[in-house]
Image: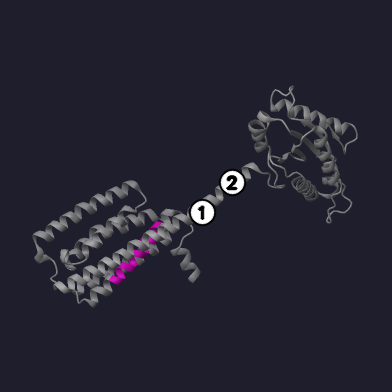
Amino acid sequence: MLERLKNIIVPKQTFEVALFWGVLIACFIAAVFSAVFSALEDIDVITVAGCVSLSVFFAVLGVVAHKTKNINACYFVMCLVIALLVMPPLFFTCGGFNSGMVFYCQTTMLVLSLCAKKILRAVLVVLSIVVDSAVFMLAWEHPEWCSKVEYGAAITDIVVSFIFMSVFIFAVVSYLLQAYQREKATKDSLIEQLNYNSAHDVLTGLFNRRYFIDVLNNEIMPNASGFYILMYDVDHFKKINDTYGHPAGDKALASIAKVAKDLFKQAKEISVRYGGEEFIQVIAADSMDEARSRSENFREAVAAIAIEEFPGMDIRISGGLVSCQNSSFENYGKMLSVVDKLLYEAKTHGRNRIVC
């Protein structure tokens, strides 16, 4: 029951939903306290009954909003009732200018200004300004229409009203800010996850082809010195899938990716799943000999992979290696075409090798 109530009061939805519940609950509490204070100050029974009725109205509106999920309409109805049907009579029955009702009228403007829909918000604010201005003028011209209170009681009422309204505004704004921060944190987390997914392969966790092409074109090719591209794929990968099943093939790809991430950790070295069982490794090295040596170490590390769930599964790779700093590479497309041909050459010469 408490968890269900928490989900209603502290919704994990949009800011507009949190806004409605924050204002509704604050107004409900304000109505309840107004009823209590009115009774304690011996204000006429009509005022007390009005505050109690208002509390009931907020409770019913909350139930309707929870059932229908029509938050914007419920917020508009709530504001309309407060601005036009509740505040004007309460202003007179609670003492007019000789009471704290002016603070309540100002707080009403805050509630109206928080309406999510721009047009409805403007309509509510204009109506409230017109109605409150008319009420103020009538109360000034006809003070006898307002309930008469002793001066001491009026000062107490003003102080209590001021403190209560200050706490009210602070509570509403704090709640709404927290709701906004929760929603923003959720959206930021979602955006971060989407950004990650847009640049990474789900199965292996390596960068994907789109991200690699972007980095290659914008960062590596303009300053190609010291960078090498190793394109490789899994030998007889179809046989692995046919013999051990596709889950075994996925496990093999993930294991190769882990080896790549463990061995290639220098700045700007990126491991890429280019497509299917084909991978690319950007290698930072001082010479082709160093790049070749590191590629061979990687090939041997892959050959040493042993997967407990699939004993006997033999994993081998073949690849082609080129230097990015080559005058014949007019663009990255030409370079990828050459390294792909070297990969094919490794395949045709027995596999399980790196061709430079």
**Residue 314, placed above or below residue 98:** above
The residue drawn where x is 88% and y is 47% is 314
Left or right of 200, for residue 241: right
Left or right of 355, for residue 20: left
**Of marks 1 and 2, which one's residue comes earlier in the chain?**
1
Image coords of residue 17 (percent x, y): 42, 56
Q: Residues within 10 Å of mark 2 (few under 14, many from 20)?
A: few
**Residue 339, placed above or below residue 164:** above
Q: Which residue is mark 2?
A: 194
**Residue 300, placed above or below residue 80:** above
Q: Which residue is mark 1?
A: 185
Image coords of residue 73 (percent x, y): 36, 54
Res. 105 visible in picture = yes
Image coords of residue 209 (percent x, y): 68, 37
Residue type highlighted by circle 2: Leu
**Residue 255, placed above or below residue 211:** below
Locate the C terminus and report the quarter of the image it occupies. top right
Q: Nearer the viewer, mark 1 or mark 2?
A: 1
Taken as a whole, is the magenta stretch helix, strand or loop?
Answer: helix
Q: Nearer the viewer, residue 354 or 133?
A: 354
Q: Residues within 10 Å of mark 1 (few under 14, many from 20)?
A: few
Residue type highlighted by circle 1: Ala
Per the image, label 1 sits on a secondary structure element best described as: helix
Residue range corresponding to the magenta coloring: 19-33
